[in-house]
Each structure stands twice: as C-alpha cells, then as structure tokens.
Amino acid sequence: MNAPRKNDEILANINSLVAEERTLRDRSLQRLGLASEERARLRSVEIQLDQCWDLLRQRRAKSEYGENPDEAAVRPANEVEGYQG
C-alpha cells in the first residue's frame, strides 16, 4: 500500500479515537463519572491511541531512513504503555 495513504488511514483512526475519547470524558464530567463499561471503553481508546501514535512514529522513522514503512507493526499495549512519547 502507498505509505502516505496508509499514514492518512492511521491519522483518520486517531482522529476518530480522539473524538470518542472526548465524548467519554465530556460524559464523565456531565454525570460525575462513567459507568464501568464506559470506563473500560475509555481505557481501551487510550491504549489504541497510544498504539496508533506509536505505529505512525515507526512508519515515519522507517520512511525517513529509507526503510519500508509497511514493515512497522502495532506493538503490544504493555510495550507502548511503558514509555513516554
């Protein structure tokens, strides 16, 4: 797949996840908290966002250094959650 197009798809996914995260956080403020399912979904969204940003950084770095960006892969949640970007 075309690298810029794939990066655009990742960014579109990030934008969608950010919108969902904002909705959940706004709902939390309006109701003074979230239901357990909503809290679990918010945590899942946060993890997916970290993974998407990590994947995008990997792809950009590979492109910058003349490597194939399609060789970048989504890393496990515990790996991307273990460092600060």
Image (cartoon, rainbow, N blue to C red):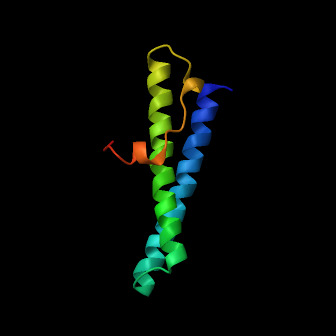
Q: Is 66 in front, or is 78?
A: 78
Q: Where residue 59 sits: x, y (%)? A: 51, 28
Q: Total number of numbered labels?
A: 0
Along the horizontal axis of the image, is 4 left or right of 55?
right
Q: Where residue 37 sits: x, y (%)? A: 54, 75
Q: Residue furthest bottom?
A: 31
Q: Where residue 49 sits: x, y (%)? A: 48, 51
Is 33 rendered above or below residue 64? below
Q: Is 51 in front, or is 19?
A: 51
Is 39 rendered above or below residue 80? below
**Residue drawn where x is 49% and y is 64% of the image:** 21
Q: Residue furthest left?
A: 84
**Residue drawn where x is 39% and y is 85% of the image:** 32
Viewport quadrant of the N terminus:
top right
Is 58 rendered above or below residue 48? above
Is 49 rendered above or below residue 21? above
Q: Residue furthest top?
A: 66
Viewport quadrant of the C terminus:
top left
**Residue drawn where x is 55% and y is 33% of the image:** 73
**Residue drawn where x is 49% and y is 13% of the image:** 66
